[in-house]
Amino acid sequence: MKLYILIYSTIYKKCCYLLVNIMNYSSSFILEFCLLFLITYIFQIIAIESKTIVIEPIDTIAISIGIIVIIINDMKKRLITGITPTGNITLGNYAGAIKPMVEAQDDNEVVIFSADLHGITTGNVNGENLEKNTINTIALYLASGIDPSKSTIFLQSEIKEHTELSYLITCHLTYGELSRMTQYKDKSSKFKMSNGTEKVPAGLLFYPSLMAADILLYDADIVPVGKDQKQHIELTRDVANRINKKYGNIFTVPSPMISKSNSSKIMSLTDPTKKMSKSDSDIQGTIFLLDNERDVRKKIKSAITDSENSIHYDPENKPGVSNLIEIIKLLSGKSYEQIEKEFVGKHYGHLKDEVANEVVLFLNNIQQKHKEILESNLIDKVLDDGYKKVKPLAQDKILELKNSIGFYNRNKG
Ligand code: ATP
Ligand code: MG
């Protein structure tokens, strides 16, 4: 009997999850709820008829609602992500960081922040650029489809608890852990002179503490990151577990969501073996979301390809052509096969024209919205709303941690 119940409940749960996943593409919550209810009802009838479970019909309704609520809540995860306002946003940032959030916001609680504190990590700050890039980053998120009625957007430096938690976390990490981070090793090596003098900014060392604070402050379940950030998430998990063990269950231990393979990675147009980057000194390889049409067409026309003149997706052997196909896929939603089919017998010139047309169309739309957003007071309103939403969460979390550590709290009781 126990085995029957186990098999039965497993199949039932699988069906519910399958349905919820299918319905992820629909925006109708009511329809989703009704279908889940129907599945639950059918399973309950089967259970009662087959005497697998002996319960009263009224209980079946209560159980159905309970299970459905649990599953729906279970599916709604809190995703948190930030973009450092260190430069103009690129098509790569759109592919890897903005688009996934736009797609996730219907079924998850999406929290986005402009990581302006991370923007001063090395102490090399141009205040004017920091402000301009912060505003543009938020405006571009909104122009790209982040809906402030579904997602929360805030400014990292406005929530002082990030810096406070960062310090509390730092005290629970070791120098060894921080200095072993690959990003620290890579970036700090650039500050070592040939004569042996070192002037490594301490901000680089403590970067992972601040990143852990960004995530743990809000009990985020999932953090979408590129492969380069996986190590920092692992450190965040370690320190969260360490603090939880020491002071009680304070933090949710987050999971990384690593973008799959190369599917959302856009490469530089001038060197398709390295990723497109907003801080790349070679701006000819980078498409910025605020580039004008003439520059975009010129950059794409000069994109590196190969001498084969055969258009198919093969990132290893044909990185340049594959990157162009990737861009069409990103913006049109077509599959690799569809794109390859459309270009059978055609030349690289045709491919580049198509890429340029897709990009120009996409950028025109984004730039038009970006302009309207800047002319309105939407950014202030969005940041005000975001502040009001996240500030109490951050305050509660800090208070909980400080009380558990044993700080003298004069307002207590
Ligand atoms: P920087 O050169 O300053 O490091 P960046 O372009 O790499 O800038 P980040 O601020 O480091 O941008 O990253 C913001 C987000 O954009 C991250 O989630 C990162 O994974 C994603 N991202 C950056 N470049 C690409 C790219 N070429 N393709 C896909 N995703 C990208
Ligand atoms: Mg980067």
Image (cartoon, rainbow, N blue to C red):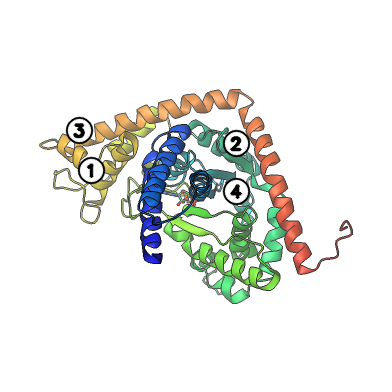
Q: Can you say which quadrant of the picture contains the N terminus?
A: bottom left
- The answer to whether residue 123 is visible is yes
Neighbor class of circle 4 (other Cα within 10 Å; few <14, some 14-19, many 20+) is many
Q: In front of the other: label 1 or label 3?
A: 1
Whether tag 4 and tag 2 are in contact, CB under 8 A, the answer is: no
Residue annotated with mark 3: 350
Question: Looking at the rendered structure, which numbered label has been put on residue 135?
Answer: 2
Q: In front of the other: label 2 or label 1?
A: 1
Label 2 CB-ligand 1 distance < 8 A: no
- The answer to whether residue 290 is visible is no
Neighbor class of circle 2 (other Cα within 10 Å; few <14, some 14-19, many 20+) is some
Relative image position of residue 358 (x, y in whole percent): 32, 31
Relative image position of residue 88 (x, y in whole percent): 50, 40
Neighbor class of circle 1 (other Cα within 10 Å; few <14, some 14-19, many 20+) is some
Query: What amino acid does circle 3 point to?
Result: His
**In this rendering, is residue 413 above or below 268?**
below
